[in-house]
Image: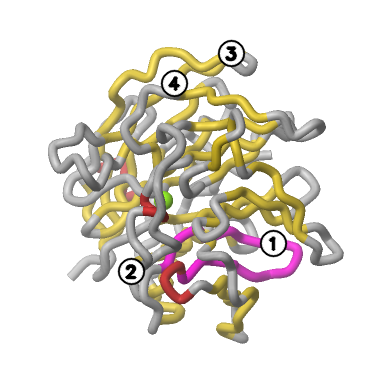
Amino acid sequence: MSFYEAVDPLFASYVLGNAPVKKLATGFDWVEGPVWFGDANCLLFSDIPNNRIMRWTPGEGLTTYRNPSNYSNGHTRDQQGRLISCEHGTRRVTRTEWDGTVTVIADQFEGKRLNSPNDVVVRSDGSIWFTDPHYGITSNYEGHQSEEELPCNVYRVDSTDLSITADVTDMGCPNGLAFSPDESLLYLADTGRVDDPGAKKGMRVYDVDGNATSGGRAFHTINPGASDGFRLDTDGNIWSSAADGVHCISPSGDLLGKILVPELVSNVCFGGRSKHVLFITATTSLYSIALRRQGVQHP
Ligand code: MG
């Protein structure tokens, strides 16, 4: 049985015939938020219900990076290579400095507490963009059950003065996000409120002009599953989580193919020596696959 499924024949050229999907580690409850540290040759990812960030190192395996992690979820790195983390438990976004101290990047907007920051990207101007759905406060599983004080917005934080702006305010529950390679487009996934079973879900794409976002047109709806998290390759293809693996979506919104993974996928990131390895967080396990693709990295 093949480890991939080509919907468009082009997809067969994206995979390597002899590079399988590998299970790197397992035994978690719900993993998400992978981020690659090339200079340290390791991957960090969140095991959210167990309140910890794990570190996987090629050839060495698994260690714990941070416990407790304040139920951290999505991660990225800024221009200085520092770890930026979304934390459900403390309802904030933080930056881990090189000396290990933690700086709060955002924990409120207009005097009200954020919900539970979920996923985060840094643009090449240093601004930090993150989604703030309510998933981390709707139960005690991935954080602390609590009331919402704000709508589920997408925010941007200025890297110099840490001022915060609500950039996208018309989504039900924004989750994964990523910029196109030239940063002219922002892809955002709406995975729907838990108290609204009929919520409209799917990926949308916004035009970005400076700090202004507009448009928000429907782009692609992952099926089966949801676009919880995704990353782009250097040609602008979107590699998104799905229930049956990782789906590769073209810049025009068409499904090109799938990497088949035996567990429901939450998120992905590119890493490895040439950013040619796709790391996949999927329910209880961490997987990887080497591709004939390269991930785009911002900044
Ligand atoms: Mg997410």
Q: For the residues marked 3 and 2, what is the alpha-carbon distance in whole angstroms? A: 36 Å
Q: Nearer the viewer, mark 1 or mark 4?
A: 4
Which residue is label 1 attached to? 38
Q: Secondary structure at mark 1?
A: loop
For marks 3 and 2, the one nearer the N-term is: 3
Say which amino acid is labelled 2. Answer: Thr
Badge 2 marks a residue whose secondary structure is: loop
Q: Is residue 47 left or right of residue 62?
A: left
Label 3 sits on a secondary structure element that is strand
Displayed quadrant of residue 41: bottom right
**If the image is split into quadrants, where does the C terminus sit?**
top right
Q: Sort mark 3 into few (<14), some (14-19) or many (20+) by Cα contacts within 10 Å.
A: few
Q: Disc 4, disc 2: CB below 8 Å?
A: no
Residue 224, image x, y percentages: 17, 50
The residue to which callout 4 is attached is 206
Q: Which residues are magenta?
A: 31-47
- Residue displayed at 57% across by 57% down: 90
Q: Amino acid at mark 1?
A: Gly
Q: Is residue 230 above or below residue 49?
A: above
Residue found at x 46% / y 71%:
47
Q: Is residue 37 magenta?
A: yes
- Percent x, y for residue 44? 59, 67
Residue position marked by numbered label 2 in the rendering: 283
In the rendered image, which residue does mark 3 sit on?
Answer: 209
